Structure formats: structure tokens, C-alpha cells
Amino acid sequence: MSALRKPRLLAANSVAVLIAVVVAFPLYWMVLSAFKPEGELLSTDPRPWTFTPTLDSFRRVFTVDGLGGYFVNSLLVAGAVVLVSLLMSFLAAVALTRFRFRGRTVLLLMLLVAQMVPVEALTIPLFFLMREVGSVAPAFGLNHLGSLVLVHLAFSLPLAIWMLRGFVAAVPAELEEAATLDGASRTRFVWQVLFPLVAPGLVATSVLSFIHAWNDFLFAKTFIISASENQTLPMAILVFFTPEGNDWGAIMAGSTLMTIPVLIFFVVVQRRLVSGLAGAVKG
């Protein structure tokens, strides 16, 4: 058996390495293009290396007016989406797992169906919806960051709830019974016992919510129409797309800079991320 396992293990590792290379190559090309001088970048004979790296593309990115404000806006939107979605999805997962009520199965199916609708198909209806919301609550209407937070929550919550439901269900009901016998209320059990136990799932869902909100371009372009002070970081890259020609070096440099906060977030939560994703699959 061991003689058969070694070739299989080698083949599996080779396939994994090949997939990793294919996935990582676009990221490598993006970073490489950000450091390439303009002559090499526009060459008809592109090469996957450069011997004359330069920071000129990054300098052009930092000359964009309001870049710092764009960064802060993106951070505010992504941070708000992560915090609110974690709180709401955790409480919803507890309710759907620990309580039996009429329409529970229908609600779970609706969460799955919500993930199947293309984002592009909902953009125009959401635009009109946000316009109406703005007449009642201006902070959540068009040209305000609140509209982006609401829309991203609507798309992040169904997946987050479905993932966390598996983690909550994995916690034995006997544990809650034991906590009740020890005098703990249901609220205390949820926040002091259940919440720490599902922490890996919370980390996994927070990563997905953060990436979805941080990299958003479609909703930011649609809902932030004229308020330039409320534009997010992806919108800053638009200045390098011009009728005269696209500044691909600056575009790649801006894209590279945008990935840094995501990488930092991954480094901070990576210890719990793997176990969180594994738990979601088991759930």
C-alpha cells in the first residue's frame, strides 16, 4: 500500500503546485508590470522579468488627488460590512439552528437562492431602491457610503449565515444544557460559550465579506455618482484610463497597492482561516 501511495501523493502534489502556479501567475504579472519601466511595459515582446525595476508607476499613483480619502472610504465601508455582517450573521445562524419556527426551511432555501442571482442583474433595481431609501434616510442613499454598506451587507449576509449555521450546529446541544444547569442564561451562553467556539467560522466569513467590499467597483461606480469625496479606492484607478491611452503601469501599481490591506488582513487571521473554511465544508 505504501508503494502505491507515494506515486499518488507525488501526483497530487504536482497537480496542486501546477494549480497554485496558474492561480498565482496573474498576481505575479500584476506586480511585475507595476515595477517595469514604460518601455518594457509597452514592448511588443513582453518578458516575465525585468532587470531595471522602477517606482515611477507608484509615484504616479500617489499623485492622484484625494487618494488618502479614497483609502479611508474603502476602509470604512469594508470595516462596517465586516463588523455588522459578523454580528447579524452570527445571531441569524443561532436562530436558524437552535430554534424551531414556522418558515425556517423556506428561509434557509431563500438564503441559497439569494446567492444564485447575478450581481449585474440587481444593480439597476438596487439603484432605484437606494434612491428611494435616500429620501427617507439620506445617509444610506445615493452618493453616500451608507448605500455601499447596505448593498454589500445584502450580498454578504446570506453566505455568511449559511456558513456559520454549520459551525453553530456542530456545537452539541448538551453543552447548552450543561451551561443552563450551571445557571447561565441563554444570552450568556451565546456570547461567552458559543461565540468563542464558532470563532473560526467568523474569521472565514469576515475574510469573504472584507474582500467583497474592498474590491468592489460596480456598486461604487453606480451609487456614488457625483460625490467625489465619498468615492472608494477602486475608483482612483479610473483616472489612468483615458481616451489618449491607458497608463497600464499606474493601473498595475494601483492594483498592487490595493492588495496590500487584503494581505495584511489575511496575515492577521490566517491561523483561524484554514480551520474556518474546513469547518464550513464539513458543516
Image (cartoon, grey):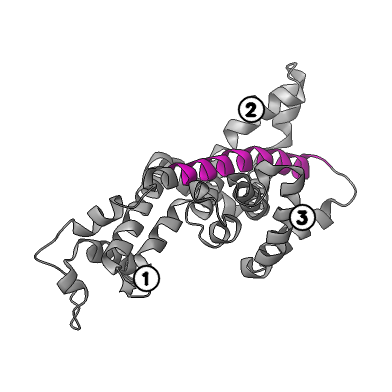
Q: Which residue is mark 2?
A: 193
Q: Vertically, is 78 above or below 36?
A: above
Residue 6 in view of the camera: no
Q: Secondary structure at mark 3?
A: helix
Q: Vertically, is 201 above or below 190?
A: below
Q: Is residue 279 left or right of residue 101?
A: left
Q: Amino acid at mark 3?
A: Leu
Q: Nearer the viewer, residue 185 or 12?
A: 185
Return the disc, 2 or 1, that comes first in the chain's sequence. 2
| Position in image of residue 19 (x %, y %) | 36, 70
Does the CB distance between marks 1 and 3 fall below 8 Å? no
Residue under the point 42% across and 41% down = 271
Q: Secondary structure at mark 2?
A: helix
Hey, which quadrant is residue 140 in on the image?
A: top right
The crowd level at tag 2 (other Cα within 10 Å; few <14, some 14-19, many 20+) is some
Q: Which residue is mark 1?
A: 242
Q: Vertically, is 13 above or below 67?
A: below
| Position in image of residue 258 (x %, y %) | 37, 53
Q: Which residue is mark 3?
A: 108
